[in-house]
Amino acid sequence: MSDPVLLTLEGVRRVHGSGAREVVALDGVDLTVRLGELVAVMGPSGSGKSTLLNVAGGLDTPTSGTVTIAGDVLSEMDAKGRAALRRKRIGYVFQDFNLIPALTAAENVSLPRELDGVPARRARTEAKAALAEVGLEKQARRFPDELSGGQQQRVAIARALVGPRRLVLADEPTGALDSVTGEAVMRVLRARVDAGAAGLLVTHEPRFAAWADRTVFLRDGTVVDSTGTDEPEALLADSSTGT
Amino acid sequence: MSVKHGLLALLAEEPMGVYRLRKEFEARTGGSWPVNIGQVYSTMQRLERDGLVAKASQQDEDVELYEPTESGRAEAAAWWRTPVARGEVGRDELVIKLALAVSAVGVDVRDIVQAQRSETMRAMRDFTRLKSQVPAPGEPISSPELAWSLVLDHHTFTAEAEVRWLDHIEASVARAVLTQSRTETTDRDEAEVPR
């Protein structure tokens, strides 16, 4: 595994409230996501899945522990620096697509680049390329309400990985889709990750988590298990206890 | 079931010899049910004995072709119409293991649930890897590929149902612990036994 690490969480702890009302959302989570890797996070409600995703994306700050994105340690940056890092490095995909209705597919995808100060022409070129990657070059001029749910989610994936962005954080991306459309979206996400991105996927649907390289199970804010074929240590542990 | 009915249904489309029947059967079931040529041959003999197939009136030069009789066609049609009965439910090792785990001493149900969930997810990932090799929904696909894809979907959905059941066990057990423990129940039951 020599692919570069895009996301690292080390000893991440996140406590909400204090005293008697203290709730430990995450308790010592270690996690690494490499380029070309899609990692699924599963766990019951309240296990810390959403907090994990928010902390990984710099939307929430851990009480202790470190989050490193593409070599930058979030806690060593100021708010402005973190915001810039988020815009440049990280894309989000949500259950309800979160596209801007008044903008075309291409404009939705180019917007984060333009906000980042990239000249409009270049941002458009990048957006077109990102849409082509998800098979939607012909729909570039359509508005979100002229697209199916599956197509809208593919636009969201294109937006998440436009330009230099390589880390996609997906929160129940198939939640609003039927099983066949959900599968199509997972295929696109998988293909984009294989083509050179890293993904962290929160889902409660095992069928879609199965598209990931690894599944991390959370329970009460702690990683209780991790399955995957690319973890020699875990495999060794299995074979030594499996007799 | 019924390799027998599957073969009969194929013969109802056109007369075939055993080699072609075997090939058709495997291709059109997505390879989910491998059959050997001996099996196909002996099935034909039994179907012939039972009056459901006969040697075809139009024969090939090299191979013997079979076709369904009238009652064979009726049997195949009835097979299509009749829903498949559920197998005996709850008779697998996992069900027994987890049922016992709920009350077993020195066993944490959550650990068993998690170990099983990891194992089932691993199997699902294997099915999904195979699935990623067939064309995506909406892309051009051959009928054997579609059959294979749907067979993989079956395995995936079945595994998913198991994972959901495991999730449900975990939640149910967690909630049950909040109200009353197993030991208290047992003590009370024993106390009620007259001495």
Image (cartoon, coloured by chain):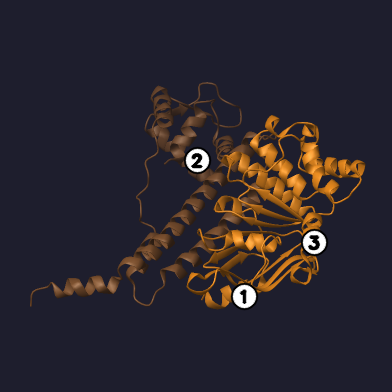
Chain colours: A orange, B brown
Circle 2 residue: B40
Q: Quadrant of residue B136?
A: top right
Q: CA distance from mark 2 to mark 3?
A: 72 Å
* Amino acid at circle 1: Leu
Q: Are marks 3 and 1 on the same chain?
A: yes
Q: Which mark is residue B178?
A: none
From the image, state whether disc 2 or disc 3 is nearer to you.
3
Q: Earlier in the sequence, mark 3 or mark 1?
A: 3
Answer whether residue A134 is visible to the viewer in this image. yes
The answer to whether the residues at label 1 and label 2 have Cβ atoms under 8 Å apart is no
Q: What element does badge 3 sit on?
A: helix
* Amino acid at circle 3: Lys
* Amino acid at circle 2: Val
Circle 3 residue: A80
Circle 1 residue: A236
Quadrant showing the C terminus of chain B: bottom left
Q: What chain letter is assigned to the residue under label 2?
A: B
Name the residue rendered at 65%, 60% in the picture: A54
Q: Position of residue B120 (x, y in %)?
A: 52, 59
From the image, state whether disc 1 or disc 2 is nearer to you.
1
Name the residue rendered at 38%, 63% in the picture: B175
Q: Position of residue A181 (x, y in %)?
A: 62, 39
